[in-house]
């Protein structure tokens, strides 16, 4: 599970480990400092896959762009089919903007 630094608490990490889920959550600076201050009782440094975390950021930015569409953000469509059609339309518009030459 890739998550933001806001979810890097020991409790969240323990919950994920207990369910066999590998967490890709970077450690906060203050948490690392507290761990180091405790010395050998502080535990091991948190493993972190920077490449996978970057992918999480890319997906999050895409979702934020989708939310700029009022119908997507407010879930205004009544049926799942029309909501999915809106997602496809929005995705196509974002893709077309990304390949358009900039003037």
Image (spheres, helix red, strand yellow):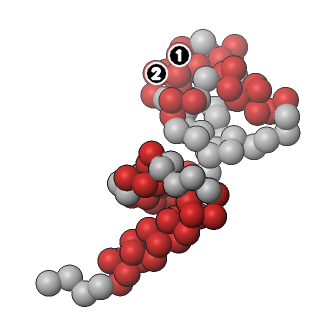
Location of residue 20 by image quarter? top right
Number of numbered markers: 2
Name the residue tied to disc 1. 34
Going by the image, does 38 lie left or right of 100? right
Badge 1 density bin: few <14, some 14–19, many ≥20, Cα 10 Å = few
Residue at (52, 65) in percent of width and height: 87
Which one is in front, 52 or 64? 64
On the image, the x and y values in percent for residue 83 come to: 56, 60
Whether residue 57 is visible, yes or no, is no
**Element under label 1?**
helix
Looking at the image, is 31 positioned above or below residue 48?
A: above
Residue at (45, 28) in percent of width and height: 29
On the image, the x and y values in percent for residue 74 come to: 45, 45
Location of residue 8 by image quarter? top right
Going by the image, does 42 lie left or right of 58? right
Name the residue tied to disc 2. 30
Looking at the image, is 76 positioned above or below residue 89?
A: above
- CA gap between label 2 and label 1 equals 6 Å
Going by the image, does 95 lie left or right of 6? left
On the image, the x and y values in percent for residue 53 come to: 55, 51
On the image, the x and y values in percent for residue 69 come to: 38, 57
Looking at the image, is 49 positioned above or below residue 9?
A: below
Residue at (57, 52) in percent of width and height: 78
**Element under label 2?**
helix
Cβ–Cβ under 8 Å for marks 2 and 1: yes
């Amino acid at each position: 599970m890739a998550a933001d630094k806001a979810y890097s608490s020991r409790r969240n990490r323990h919950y994920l480990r207990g369910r066999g889920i590998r967490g890709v959550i970077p450690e906060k600076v203050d948490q690392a400092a507290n761990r180091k201050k405790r010395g050998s009782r502080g535990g091991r440094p948190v493993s972190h896959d920077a490449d996978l975390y970057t992918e999480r950021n890319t997906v999050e930015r895409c979702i934020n762009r989708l939310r700029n569409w009022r119908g997507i953000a407010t879930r205004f469509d009544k049926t799942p089919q029309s909501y999915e059609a809106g997602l496809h339309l929005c995705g196509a518009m974002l893709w077309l903007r990304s390949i358009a030459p900039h003037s």
